[in-house]
Amino acid sequence: MFHSAILKLTSWYLLILMSISLLFSVAVYNVATSELHDRLTAFENRFEQQPDMMPYSNPGQRLFSAFRNDQRETADRNIFWTLVYVNTLILIGGGALSYILARRTLQEIETAHEAQSRFTSDASHELRTPLAAMRSELEVALRDPKLSKAEMRELLESNLEEVDRLTVLSKTLLQLSKMDYANIDFEQVNLSNIAAEVSQRYDKNAKRIVLEQPKNSVLIKANQTSIEELLTILVDNALKYSPEKSKITAAVSIQGKFAVFEIANGGKGIPQDKLPHIFERFYRADESRTKGGAGLGLALAKEIVAMHKGELSVSSSTGHTSFRVQLPILRKK
């Protein structure tokens, strides 16, 4: 579809370019030939008025007229073919340039369309999986007349887990949609306070999360709810994919004109070939991790950071994974 659109757009670009070129060529041809004819005619008139040419007026006039006509035809022909060559070059060069411009014009649209199609397909798959599991369990239960109370309870608990999964998935999809389209309010927020609140929420006794913060407040211009969601995703991800009771180190700092939040955890790490993809929607670096979500958390984190004109990066090796968030600082206090 986009290849056809590129060719059509190229044709329109080329048509406009050649229309302008041909109109300009016609104007140049008419002006040049008219000017040439006028100059030759004026020169012929001056030639006829010379006194020393009077005795030879008739032969001289005929000779000059032939010469004038020959020069005029030669000049007209040269101008015509020069303009043909120029327009041919414009046609070839303009065609190539038009194709390049058409591709560049539609490239972002094509990328967005592909991303939307992939997102829709992945979302449908993620929604279909828990629904299919629930349907299967319910059908089996309805066909079993001897279903005990304990088995029914187990079935309901299993379905409740799938409902929770669907709830989280729909909430995250809605958040991603807001990141794409909504105008979100920004205000002065304290990154240090948010980091402390999120850490305490997950680890009230500070047994696993070690948080380092500067003495002064780290203020940024941001949407507080989004920043809370960002740090929640990173802290939850660090806890989820590290050995139980292992230490999680987090730090808030000021580096130049940026506020930085870094969080590191131990574990088997992320393979290097999968690192570039972990921020893609619905991507899971390890499908065997059953306690993982739908693969939307880091994608949402990336969207939040981009919305705040910051950077989110990751480094990983065996036994260590670190995420680094860099956001423009507002001021020190």
Image (spheres, rainbow, N blue to C red):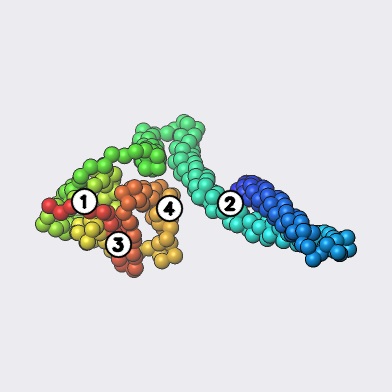
Residue visible at 43% across and 53% down in the picture = 280
Mark 4 secondary-structure assignment:
loop
Q: Is residue 268 left or right of residue 210?
A: right
Which amino acid, by three-letter code, is at mark 3? Ser
Residue visible at 43% across and 50% down in the picture = 281
Q: Is residue 222 left or right of residue 87?
A: left
Residue 206 position by quadrant: bottom left
Query: Which of pointers 2 and 1 indicates the residue nearer the eye?
Result: 2
Residue visible at 15% across and 57% down in the picture = 213
Query: Which of pointers 3 and 1 indicates the residue nearer the eye?
Result: 1
**How many other residues sit within 10 Å of disc 4, few (<14), some (14-19) or many (≥20)?**
some
| Residue 158: image tag | none
| Residue 330: image tag | 1
Query: Which of pointers 2 and 4 indicates the residue nearer the eye?
Result: 2
Mark 3 secondary-structure assignment:
strand
Q: Is residue 123 left or right of residue 233?
A: right
Picture layout, residue 286 above or below residue 233? below
Q: Nearer the viewer, residue 209 or 193?
A: 193
Q: Position of residue 273 (x, y in %)?
A: 44, 65
Q: Position of residue 158 (x, y in %)?
A: 38, 40
Q: Nearer the viewer, residue 207 or 325?
A: 325
